Amino acid sequence: MDINRSYLYLLLNIEVNMSEIQNKVVIITGASSGLGEATARRLGDSGAKLMLAARREDRLKELVAAIAKLGGTATYQVTDVADCAQMEALAQKTLSTYGRIDVLINNEFYEIAIDADAIARAIAYAIEQPGDVDVNEMIIRPTRQEL
């Protein structure tokens, strides 16, 4: 793997009033492992209402149970992000479950030399910004590398 070309691209659809994570409705794709799972755990612990999406239902069920055990709110929808109909169903289930969508974390993850929890902290930081700060996408590249 060429670390210089490793990157992570996240599309964050964040509405204006994002000053706190508590009670924000967040969809996370790719939530069954890695960055998606780490982000779900961090945001769930911070009081976000989560809709988790991935193809592996067994992993989604385990993650929803783990978040609920710690007092968080999460549900899931098995979703292949390459299928537009499944993405529409994900949005509709989120709306019917929580009544709105505040944040979409479209987790397109490539092998990367950054700890998943560090990226989850960056995502939480972006969501916590006051309403006059509009964060609508993040591109994260490793900044410290072995030569």
Image: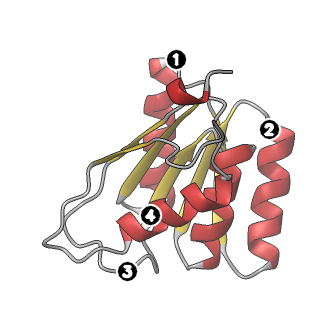
Q: Secondary structure at mark 4?
A: strand
The nearer-to-camera label among 3 and 1 is: 3
When the figure is inspected, residue 2 is found, relative to residue 13, above or below; the finding is: above
Image spot of residue 60 (x, y percent):
77, 47
The residue lying furthest to the left in this view is 132
Q: Which residue is mark 1?
A: 83
Q: Is residue 101 visible?
A: no
Q: Quadrant of residue 55?
A: top right
Of labels 4 and 1, earlier in sequence is 4
CB atoms of marks 3 and 1 within 8 Å: no
Name the kind of residue labelled 4 in the image. Val
Of labels 4 and 3, earlier in sequence is 3
Q: Which residue is mark 3?
A: 20
The nearer-to-camera label among 3 and 2 is: 3
Q: Secondary structure at mark 2?
A: helix
The residue lying furthest to the top in this view is 83
